[in-house]
Image (tube, grey):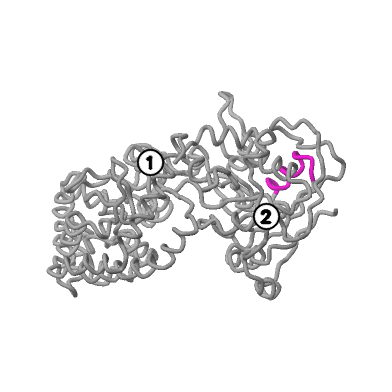
Amino acid sequence: MKKSKKLVSLMLTAAMGASLLTGCSKGGEEEVQVTEDTYNYTGQAPITDQEGATVSILARNSFYSTVDLANAPIVQEVEKRSGVSLDWTFISPANYIDSVSPMLASGTDLPDIVQLPDLDPNMNYIKSGLFTPLDEYMDEMPNFQAFLDENPSIKASLTAEDGHIYYVPITVVTNNYQPCAMINMQWLEQAGLEVPTTLDELVEVLRVFKEQDMNGNGDPNDEIPMSIMAEHIPYMFGPAFGLDLVSGFYADDNGQVHYAYGESEQYKAYLEFLNGLFQEGLLEVEFTTLTRDQITERCAQNLTGFTFDFSWQMSQLYSSQYPEYDGTEGIMVGIPPLSGDEEGYYLARQPFEYVFGVSAQSANPVLAARFLDYAMSPECQELYVWGIEGESYVVNEDGTKSYTEKAATDSMWLQELGINPVCLPSQQSVEATDVLLPEWHVQVDKELEQYMKSTWPFVYATEEESSIISQYLVDLTTYAEEMNVAFITGTTSLDEFDNYLNTLDSMNLQELLTVRQAQYDRYAASQSGTQQ
């Protein structure tokens, strides 16, 4: 088969979506003629000795509209080394879910490998027989096996209710370069204050920022002490009260699952604190509509003293807005988490966000499994992270690697090269991220790493659990979010908090907690290697 890059139209996928996801067992009624491959694959290239062997793959294209991964040298190099021809179907990430979901719903004419539109949280595709259990091919997947052995928590998340593992993930950095609080170090030094370590100390700092002419323009009233987007407030302040308000559900040290927005004491104390900030003008009136662009402009005009965002923005966006910034010292700099009623922490990232499966319709599932395995090999990971030797990186005398000047200064060229390709099971590298950032930022990141705490894990839902979640969770979440803003702004008095808790219970919170507890117990048992 000639290698090709297929363009998939939305009209075509919409037409394919007429079929529902039911009864698609092992590719429908057609019997798959499986090709036998007796080549002794050991985890290194090539993956077969068959002439003209082809693997077809459906995957996301680059998130940059000007980049086409079909022409990316890194992707082409993986294909060249693997010894097979890759028949790609690339679809824009913007249309991927809407395009691929109908394809899976029809359950026919699927390629050998599919990058799923989601994580299949309710096991719809698994239960429909669309994908092959990969644990049955572990003898052909030594790299994947080693990865699972080294990452028991990810293995636990990937293990379905039936005990099989169906998907290979793309992983991301979890404990580095995550959302954190950032403070204007120039303002802090000018005010003669220390970096705050508690919520009370932060309030005192914000009061100074609000009341004094921190930017020295003669106007003591134009300073905005804190600029934080509404979506980041739970990240920033929840942990100080022992709450994971980002995931919503969390397990305590004893494995007991709680709903953070329904905790009678901790969540009420959280709301009282934020309402106090709002009433004092330390949390701005229009915080619910604040955007990153607005915060960026405030930094450019030296109007704000405190924010919270993904660590990447620390040097790459916020500090770089200041005319005096020269890259040697940060201006908007990350600080350790603030403590309140509980010791503060930061929430780490879910370790994977995309998964690949081998279609049950594949005529050569062994070859498809091998390719996914090879794509996870150390050799390929080095390609994803560093690119092509001599072009994007060089090997130093001490054996370490460094990006070339072009790679370090031209991020778009790196994307065109195919760095960290979203179409292959890559694992993001802290080391490669470090070399893209100024030394001060890297040092701050390493200091903050110790404060990261795992968030709620990804866990598959059974059919019964999925039914309960779909019935109740959206309405419950919507109500909790609406009341969250109402309590913070004071449009609803906190005297109504008990009524709020009663309403949550009337919206079947306890049933949801029972479901989440069962899911967490399965995850914990799988991680420890025991059976429920």
Does any portion of residue 144 appear in the rendered image?
yes
User: x, y (%) of residue 8?
Assistant: 71, 67
CA–CA distance between discs 2 and 1?
A: 30 Å
Q: Is the magenta stretch mostly helix, strand or loop?
A: helix
**What residue lies at 23% left-to-right and 71% top-to-bottom?**
486
Q: Do the residues labelled 2 and 1 touch (CB within 8 Å)?
A: no
Residue under label 1: 445
**Residue 522 location, quadrant:** top left
Residue 63 circle label: none
Numbered label attached to residue 69: 2
**Amino acid at pointer 2:** Leu
Q: Considering depth in this image, is 171 or 292 the residue closer to the camera?
A: 171
Q: Position of residue 373 (x, y in %)?
A: 66, 39
Q: Which residue is drawn at 54% across and 43% down?
A: 163
| Residue numbers of the magenta segment | 73-84
Most extreme residue toward the right is 51
N-terminal of the two: label 2 or label 1? 2
Decide: few, some or many residues near mark 2? Use Cα within 10 Å; few <14, some 14-19, many ≥20: many
Magenta span contains residue 230? no
Q: In this view, does 143 lie to the left or right of 440?
A: right
Assign a secondary structure to mark 2: helix
Front in this rendered view, residue 307 or 115:
115
